[in-house]
């Protein structure tokens, strides 16, 4: 198919509740949607899961916009793309910028699946028809608010609860949560807030029967994560550390963790995500799909990749209503009893609500 046109939309959407991690508080989301059109005027959609400021990863919304505009879109516009696997070759000269690459690649995967009249899940090699999901809860100033959030989400049926931690908001918080909820599947996410000097604090977490501790140390610290894992009974799960197949291979070889959180954006797209999935499958490393507080479009891509077999642990792809008063897709994503149905209709399997998209758009640009 020929990539005839690409449209970028800069989106601003306000979440229902602020979300606090060890790196900051977010409520006003700012990200990019990518729409690609082929010669039959079919549209594919992708989401660039950036934030206004580079707090989670080095990219931010304006940097990704520039990357797409100046390098990535010109490299594929009017090109004949037989299969999305080919995009890697067009993007390879340009280093990193994975969130930008992933957004354009994801839109072309959706377009490809639609042109083949199959679901995105099927195009990716997914086999599951339902997936299990958990929910990620932010740091709260007041412990009662956190306990209440956990109670509500557990009652809604989410398959596991993840709570964010940071130094000073960790062991005591987890202890309090465990006292109130002795049996729930529970995990914590530090978003790189610790160093090896904190090993004693981290070791105390072993007593709480946590499913895993997500990303305790800095992204580049694969060797330190391996040292830490040797000190801990609780499995370490890597998030920010894994940007590519090679990162995953080296982390597994070093023993830097026992579980991988895969985010499509962070690894540069669905083609790379499949490669990492297949590696983890061979190496018996369980995986789950992380979230970036996405709109429904990014969420739909997450559902599709989670339908691959080695996504054996519940992911962070919660209901649209967890984040938004109104999402930009129809129907909205609705988790029931901790389960989501994988759409079988062509492409991402959700309709784009263009009125809602345009209502939230601050800037657009058309390339054709
Ligand atoms: O570390 O997984 C993370 C949100 C933004 C940036 C990083 C992370 C998160 C989450 C929330 O944990 C996941 C979600 O609900 O989309
Ligand atoms: Mg994380």
Image (cartoon, grey):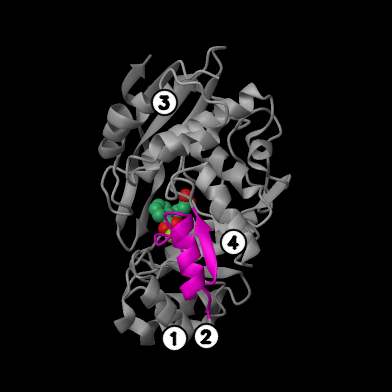
Q: Secondary structure at mark 3?
A: helix
Q: Which residue is mark 4?
A: 280
Where in the figure is residue 278, as x and y percent of width and height?
61, 55
Q: Who's the residue at 43% across and 48% down the image?
A: 292
Q: Who's the residue at 30% across and 46% down the image?
A: 59
* Residue 323 belongs to the span the image colors magenta: no
Range covered by the magenta-colored residues? 234-262
Quarter, ligand 1: bottom left
- Mark 1 or mark 4: which comes first in sequence? 1
Mark 4 neighbour class, 10 Å CA radius: few under 14, some 14 to 19, many 20 or more? many
* Residue 237 belongs to the span the image colors magenta: yes
Q: Distance from label 4 to label 2 (Cα)? A: 28 Å
Q: Which residue is mark 1?
A: 204
**Split into 4 quadrants, where in the image is the N terminus?**
top right
Q: Who's the residue at 51% across and 34% down the image?
A: 86
- Mark 1 or mark 3: which comes first in sequence? 3
Q: Are the two marked residues, 1 and 3, in contact with CB atoms closer than 8 angstroms?
A: no
Q: Distance from label 1 to label 3 (Cα)? A: 51 Å
Q: Which residue is mark 2?
A: 207
Q: Secondary structure at mark 4?
A: helix
Q: Are the two marked residues, 1 and 4, in contact with CB atoms closer than 8 angstroms?
A: no
């Amino acid at each position: 198919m020929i990539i005839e046109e690409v449209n970028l939309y800069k989106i601003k959407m306000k979440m229902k509740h602020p979300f606090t991690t060890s790196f900051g508080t977010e409520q006003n989301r700012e990200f990019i949607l990518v729409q690609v059109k082929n010669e039959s005027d079919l549209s594919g959609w992708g989401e660039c899961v950036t934030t206004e400021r580079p707090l989670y990863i080095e990219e931010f919304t304006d940097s990704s916009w520039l990357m797409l505009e100046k390098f990535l879109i010109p490299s594929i516009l009017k090109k004949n793309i037989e299969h999305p696997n080919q995009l890697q070759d067009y993007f390879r000269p340009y280093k990193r910028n994975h969130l930008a690459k992933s957004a354009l690649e994801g839109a072309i995967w959706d377009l490809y699946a639609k042109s083949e009249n199959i679901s995105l899940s099927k195009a990716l090699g997914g086999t599951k028809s339902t997936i299990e999901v958990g929910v990620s809860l932010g740091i709260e100033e007041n412990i009662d608010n956190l306990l209440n959030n956990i109670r509500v989400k557990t009652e809604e049926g989410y398959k596991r609860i993840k709570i964010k931690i940071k130094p000073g908001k960790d062991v005591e918080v987890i202890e309090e949560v465990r006292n109130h909820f002795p049996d729930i599947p529970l995990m914590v996410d530090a978003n790189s807030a610790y160093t090896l000097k904190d090993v004693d604090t981290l070791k105390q977490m072993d007593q709480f029967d946590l499913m895993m501790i997500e990303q305790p140390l800095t992204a580049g610290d694969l060797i330190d994560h391996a040292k830490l894992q040797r000190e801990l009974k609780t499995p370490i799960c890597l998030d920010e550390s894994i940007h590519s197949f090679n990162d995953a291979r080296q982390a597994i070889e070093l023993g830097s963790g026992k579980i991988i959180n895969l985010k499509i954006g962070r690894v540069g797209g669905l083609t790379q995500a499949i490669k990492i999935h297949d590696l983890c499958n061979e190496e018996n490393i369980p995986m789950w799909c992380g979230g970036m507080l996405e709109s429904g479009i990014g969420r739909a891509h997450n559902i599709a990749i989670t339908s691959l077999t080695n996504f054996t642990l519940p992911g962070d792809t919660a209901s649209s209503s967890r984040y938004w008063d109104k999402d930009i897709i129809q129907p909205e994503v609705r988790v029931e009893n901790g389960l989501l149905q994988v759409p079988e209709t062509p492409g991402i399997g959700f309709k784009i609500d263009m009125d809602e998209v345009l209502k939230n758009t601050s800037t657009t640009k058309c390339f054709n």
